[in-house]
Amino acid sequence: MYMLPSILKPGDTLGVVAPASPFDPALFEMGVRAIEDMGFNLSVDKVVNERLGYLAGSDHQRADHLMRMFDDPEIDGIICARGGYGAMRTLQFLDEDRIAANPKAFVGFSDITALLSFLFSRCRMVCFHGPTLTTLGKGAPSTREHFYSTMTRPLPMSIKASKARVIRQGNAKGPFLCGNLTLFCHLTGTLFQPNFSGSIVLFEDQGEAPYRIDRMLTQMRLAGCFDGVAGVALGSFKNCGMEKEIHTIFADVLSGLGVPLVAGFDVGHTDVNLTVPVGAPVELESDTCTLRFNAPERSSEENVMGLNPWA
């Protein structure tokens, strides 16, 4: 059972957090204009401008600001300023019960995978793998359009692989997990390692040599991360070498799992970065190369209480 945050509407306020690295002010302002053009308001605390080497402030500062955004009743949703590195360092300072008591639309990608995994696994909350503020403004128009559509409309929704390649045929269902391969690998063996069993998992990455992708997948396979996984999808692997080679590595390392494996979804570090709901039930169909998302099922009592705004 997963909690759905309320869908957003024009006039709602998005709180900006910087849980990882410092950001480029020019790209940040481009993102601000893009969000405001959509009709949303932004709440930008001066703490997001903190700098501590390659981090946007201390671990406690970044974690505390994120918690305050979830606690604040005036904040309707939360968007990350940037990925980079550092979100993983905040996990030990987050209060999952406080967050779960105030579910809100939360969006980010890349290094933010650590937080998406935490919100899904620990808080049982649907969140969103999508652009950060510094990538939203410079992204393709379809990135902004899909962001707005996903955040303001109820499920169901679907996305189709634009550069579809079926590596292994089959259909599968399960909760949707999505994120950066490197971050998932670095969470392996920690208290925050996600459980892929029964899930459809989409991986993306950038700037990793093919042998490093092989090494990360092999480590995760040996650690049992893929035991019981229902299906695997691949997003973009920017500056990671030839796509065909990356697909071959996944096919080789994940051989024997007997699950569908479909590549070519516009999710990740490219101009087109589609926003997708992490934690929502999804169907992976290899014949159409489509991911179909549905609203999580709720009990009749929860529906009466108004806790399923997207059903």
Image: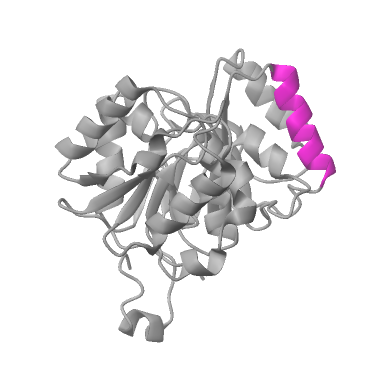
Question: Is residue 194 covered in magenta?
Answer: no
**212 is within the stretch colored magenta:** yes
Q: How many marks?
A: 0
Residue 42 at least partly seen = yes
Which quarter shows the C terminus? Answer: bottom left
Residue at the spot 58% in from the left edge and 44% down from the top edge: 59
- Of 193 and 59, nearer the camera is 59
**In this view, 96 is above or below 10:** below
> In the drawing, does residue 110 fall left or right of residue 253?
left
- Residue 165: x %, y % from top left: 53, 28
The magenta segment is: 210-223
Foreground pick, 125 / 175: 125
Residue 199 spot, x, y in % from top left: 61, 54
Q: Is residue 82 above or below residue 78?
A: above
- Magenta-drawn stretch, dominant element (helix, strand or loop): helix
* Residue 139 shows in the view: no
